[in-house]
Each structure stands twice: as C-alpha cells, then as structure tokens.
C-alpha cells in the first residue's frame, strides 16, 4: 500500500500509454526488480505524439510499439479530436483508454499509467516550470500550456480505480525526462536515507518521496541537473 503524507490527494499530471521495461544488469540488481514501470523515456517506451506528424519518418517507431502499419495515417486525425498533447501526455484516463482500444487492442504488453504530483507542490511547479513556445513565422516567443502543465493546471485528483505503484523521481524540463534510476541515484539514496525502492522499483510512500526530493535537491552531483519531482504512478485497467 502506497502511503501518502497528507489527506490531499495527488493532482493528476497526465496519463501515459507505455510499456514496462527490463531492468538490465546495469541497474542495481540488488535494489530493483527485474521489470520496471517508469515515466522516463530513458527507461520505458511510450506512445509519442510526434509519430503522427511524419509517419514516413517515424512510422517505424509506432509499428515497433505495436500500432498496425495500415493504421498510421489515422493517428494525426485521432489526436486532433482527442485530448493528447506533446510529447506523450493524454489529458484524461478516458482518452488514454480510447487510444489503446482504437490502435492497440491486442497489445498485451501495453499499460496505462497515470501520474500525480503531491498537491502541495502543484502551485510552485506551475510557477517555476513555465512553458515557452517559439513561432518560427514571426520569430517571437510566447508562454504556452500543454502536456503535464495543462493537466496539472486543472487541479483534479487522479481518478479512482487504479493501482498505486509508488513514487518516481523524474527530471522535468518542459516534459518528463530522466528518472533517478538513469544515474543510479537509488544507491546513493539508500545509503544516505535508508530508503529502498519497492517491488515496482519506486518509492513506497509520499513522505519518503518528499525526503528523497529534498535530498536530491541538496545533492545535485548525484544525478542529472534538476529539477526533479516526486511523481506518483498509478496503473489503470485498460
């Protein structure tokens, strides 16, 4: 049972159509399970919105993920009529489920994962992680809101019916990037705080996740340059 630090439920930050990943022997076999669930593209493959933009260039990646090649031309139109935004964020559980039912009905290795950020961190996150887009036609920049930021700005809790797996420390830079597992930071954390990954390779409780978050901010040399945030991962039935 994943333990939370307060009564306020984590705020939904998006839903991801992803796959589990083999740990590999390079990643702490004494601390981590053989199969990992992760929000980081460095660890686990997930559906990418950009695949629909140029199927001739990127269609092979979509096919490798499990989407039938004859269905590739349908991807962009489907995205336009549903809640999904760059790089891989579905805006609701219903949108993620609709995508799986439409394009991956027989892909047994695909999972739907919801991500949540502790409620106390949402306001600071949205203030600190302002997104900027560049308009090549005018040569100007402007603030934008998409993906994780867009879903968080609605300040809705994650929907019920999923299985909380634990918290993952993931770097954020306009989108979710490196996991703490990418740099083996779990070993330094275990040594410094006696916090060990759970059966899913994640941090079991919110209180420990916040401790790890604070420690990583104080020890940037132990990971990629931040900022990292503690994201709750919840696995939902397809």
Image (tube, grey):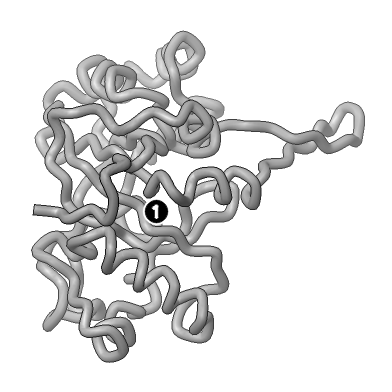
Q: Is residue 156 above or below residue 175?
A: above
Does the image show residue 107?
Answer: yes
Q: Residue at x 24, y 21 (%)?
A: 97
Q: Residue at x 33, y 79 (%)?
A: 184
Task: Decide if residue 186 is on the left or right side of residue 58.
Answer: left
How many circles with numbers are drawn on the protein?
1
What percent of the width, then of the height, locates residue 174?
Answer: 59, 47
**Kind of element beneath mark 1:** loop
What percent of the width, then of the height, locates residue 204?
Answer: 18, 62
- Identify the residue position indicated by label 1 in the image: 41
Q: Residue at x 57, y 50 (%)?
A: 124
Q: Nearer the viewer, residue 165 or 210?
A: 210
Does the image show residue 56?
Answer: no
Q: Nearer the viewer, residue 90 or 126?
A: 126
Q: Nearer the viewer, residue 196 or 135?
A: 196
Task: Decide if residue 17 is on the left or right side of residue 34.
Answer: right
Q: Nearer the viewer, residue 197 or 33?
A: 197
Which quadrant holds residue 73? top left
Q: Residue at x 22, y 63 (%)?
A: 202
Q: Is residue 62 above or below residue 217?
A: above
Residue found farthest to the front: 7
Task: Decide if residue 197 is on the left or right side of residue 138.
Answer: left
Which quadrant holds residue 216? bottom left
Query: Badge 1 local density, few (<14 within 10 Å), some, or many (20+)?
Result: some
What percent of the width, then of the height, locates residue 221?
Answer: 52, 85
What percent of the width, then of the height, locates residue 134?
Answer: 79, 37
Q: Is residue 31 above or below residue 67?
A: below
Q: Is residue 150 above or below residue 42?
A: above
Specify the quadrant that holds the C terminus. top left
């Amino acid at each position: 049972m994943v333990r939370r630090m307060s009564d306020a439920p984590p705020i939904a930050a998006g839903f991801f159509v992803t796959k589990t990943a083999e740990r590999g022997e390079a990643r702490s076999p004494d601390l981590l399970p053989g199969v990992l669930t992760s929000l980081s593209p460095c660890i686990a493959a997930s559906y990418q919105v950009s695949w629909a933009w140029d199927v001739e260039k990127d269609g092979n990646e979509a096919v490798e993920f499990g989407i039938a090649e004859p269905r590739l031309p349908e991807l962009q139109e489907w995205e336009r009529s549903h809640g999904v935004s760059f790089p891989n964020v579905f805006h609701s559980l219903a949108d993620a489920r609709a995508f799986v039912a439409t394009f991956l009905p027989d892909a047994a290795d695909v999972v739907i994962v919801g991500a949540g950020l502790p409620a106390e961190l949402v306001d600071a996150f949205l203030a600190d992680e302002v997104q900027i887009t560049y308009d090549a036609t005018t040569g100007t920049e402007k603030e934008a809101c998409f993906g994780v930021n867009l879903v968080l700005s609605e300040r809705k809790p994650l929907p019920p019916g999923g299985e909380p797996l634990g918290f993952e420390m993931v770097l954020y830079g306009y989108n979710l990037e490196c996991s703490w597992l990418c740099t083996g930071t779990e070993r330094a954390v275990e040594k410094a705080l006696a916090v060990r990954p759970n059966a899913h390779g994640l941090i079991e409780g919110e209180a420990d996740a916040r401790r790890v978050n604070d420690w990583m901010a104080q020890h940037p040399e132990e990971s990629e340059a931040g900022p990292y945030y503690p994201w709750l991962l919840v696995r939902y039935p397809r």
